[in-house]
Image (cartoon, grey):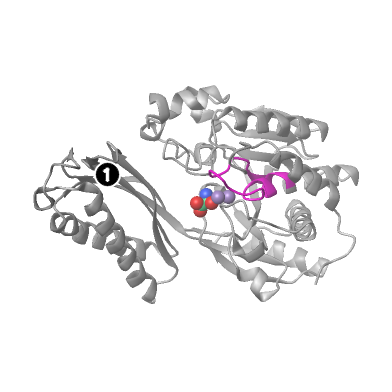
């Protein structure tokens, strides 16, 4: 059921979303990859919108764009709301951006109602939530949580640039990351499209996220031998790409095995592969595979990684190659939505006449890192066909406005102290 006369401006939120969506690689809509000139163009647009809303803007040392409005009672801490504005390649118009712009709409709506919170309020666009060209995700929110490590800063991306240099390029400061780490956050709230089919299928207006799956990303390096594709007899080949294909199939089987067990939500994907020398007339000498695994329970992930390490070297050997390295690129534990904030979102939804349900998130989010240093919670809105990370991603204006309105209601409850002591 859709609520009427929501306390936010649905049309203005939608207009912002469509305007930001225009800032994309025209050949691969919708693409605004972190650290690129297009991303910076989107950042400049956001900064202007934040300032038009009366927010004082800054880029913190972690490269996050922050719009701040002081509260009436300094020292009460900061309520932070937002998400991310970077996209995957050929992604959608709502993943991340819906959360940043819904947060901006909430800040505008509070101001237009003359409502000054006791808490300071910040609207945030977190840097590089998606897996960037450097292989690292959630760069900005890790900085806020104090978990952006020197090793991550040294990761090398395209053209040999390090994360640290790219961070400087977008206004951050890897030498002052201690200043990015926050201890003043009273609550973090993030609106996000569900990126799955549950809310649409069940015809429910909002999802209140109780668990965000942990994400482990591994790089598998498969070594064969580069040889002439035309002169090397089949039985003498050590084709790294054939071995990589066998590993991909074996990994899919392992993921099916893990997801069938009663060990909670589990999925694993190999969506990125780098072949060397990657030439039609050369037998592949080496292949790097990037594994992306998600688990609701940490023990399930540990079982998966143990079985992967046990089985994949044999698969490579059986196909004439060698699995020379299994490198952990990132390893993020599952996160829990703060109980009091989830209740505040639930009560706000009820007050608006919106239906809702508790749920888990298979997608990773900046909220995971905020949850390590502050009470954090997420509200999901439906997306058509559950599709995301593709240009077909779609959300309805009224659905997004409903999510923004619930977030506004929860903020008012948090601000008056009606949502305290929720951390389990
Ligand atoms: O990959 C994810 O789960 C998120 O969309 N970054
Ligand atoms: Mn995403
Ligand atoms: Mn996202």
> Is 19 located above or below residue 251 in the figure?
above
Residue 211, x across and y down, in percent: 53, 63
Residue 262 occupies quadrant: bottom left
Question: Residue 333: in sight, yes or no?
Answer: no
Residue 291, x across and y down, in percent: 35, 52
Of residues 206 and 276, which is closer to you in this image?
276
> Is 422 located above or below residue 13 in the figure?
below
Q: For the point 65% across and 69% down, which residue is it?
A: 199
Q: For the point 66% across and 39% down, which residue is it?
A: 124
Of residues 94 and 264, which is closer to you in this image?
94
Mark 1 packing: few (<14 Cα in 10 Å), some, or many (20+)?
many
Of residues 224 and 210, which is closer to you in this image?
224
* Label 1 secondary element: strand
Q: For the point 52% across and 23% down, which residue is it?
A: 168
> Is 29 located above or below residue 387 in the figure?
above
Determine if the magenta segment contains residue 90.
yes
Which residue bears the numbered disc 1? Answer: 287
Query: Left or right of 196: which side holds 227?
Result: left
Question: Residue 40: in sight, yes or no?
Answer: yes
Of residues 144 and 28, which is closer to you in this image?
28
Determine if the magenta segment contains residue 94.
yes
Residue sitting at the far front: 230
Residue 218, x across and y down, in percent: 33, 49
Quadrant position of the N terminus in the picture: bottom right
What range of the chain is rendered magenta? 81-101
């Amino acid at each position: 059921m859709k609520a009427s006369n929501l306390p936010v401006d649905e049309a203005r939120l939608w207009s912002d979303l469509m305007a930001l969506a225009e800032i994309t690689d025209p050949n691969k809509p919708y693409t605004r990859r972190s650290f690129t000139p297009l991303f910076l163009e989107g950042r400049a647009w956001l900064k202007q919108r934040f300032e038009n809303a009366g927010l004082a803007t800054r880029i913190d040392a972690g490269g996050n764009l922050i719009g701040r409005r002081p509260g009436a009672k300094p020292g009460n801490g900061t309520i932070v709301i937002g998400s991310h504005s970077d996209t995957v390649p050929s992604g959608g118009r709502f993943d991340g951006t819906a959360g940043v712009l819904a947060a901006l709409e909430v800040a505008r709506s509070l101001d237009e109602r003359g409502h000054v919170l006791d808490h300071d309020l910040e609207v945030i666009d977190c840097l590089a939530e998606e897996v960037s060209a450097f292989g690292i995700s959630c760069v900005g929110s890790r900085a806020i949580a104090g978990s952006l490590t020197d090793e991550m800063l040294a990761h090398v991306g395209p053209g040999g640039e390090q994360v640290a240099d790219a961070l400087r390029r977008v206004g951050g400061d890897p030498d002052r990351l201690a200043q990015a780490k926050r201890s003043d956050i009273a609550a973090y709230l993030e609106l996000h499209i569900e990126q799955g089919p549950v809310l649409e299928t069940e015809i429910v207006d909002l999802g209140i996220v109780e668990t965000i799956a942990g994400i482990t990303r591994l790089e598998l390096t498969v070594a064969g031998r580069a040889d002439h594709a035309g002169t090397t007899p089949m039985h003498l080949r050590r084709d790294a790409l054939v071995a990589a294909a066998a590993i991909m199939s074996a990994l899919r089987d392992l993921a099916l095995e893990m997801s069938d067990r009663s060990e909670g939500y589990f999925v694993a994907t190999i969506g990125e592969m780098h072949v060397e020398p990657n030439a039609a007339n050369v037998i592949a000498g080496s292949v790097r595979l990037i594994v992306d695994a998600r688990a609701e329970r940490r023990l399930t992930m540990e079982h998966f990684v143990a079985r992967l390490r046990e089985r994949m070297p044999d698969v490579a050997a059986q196909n004439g190659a060698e699995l020379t390295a299994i490198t952990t690129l990132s390893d993020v534990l599952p996160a829990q939505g703060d109980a009091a904030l989830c209740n505040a979102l639930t009560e706000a939804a009820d007050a608006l006449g919106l239906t809702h349900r508790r749920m888990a998130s298979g997608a990773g989010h900046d909220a995971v890192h905020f949850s390590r240093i502050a009470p954090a919670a997420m509200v999901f809105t439906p997306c058509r066909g559950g599709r995301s990370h593709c240009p077909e991603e779609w959300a309805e204006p009224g659905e997004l406005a409903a999510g923004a309105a619930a977030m506004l209601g929860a903020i008012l409850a948090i601000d008056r102290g009606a949502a305290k002591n929720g951390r389990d």
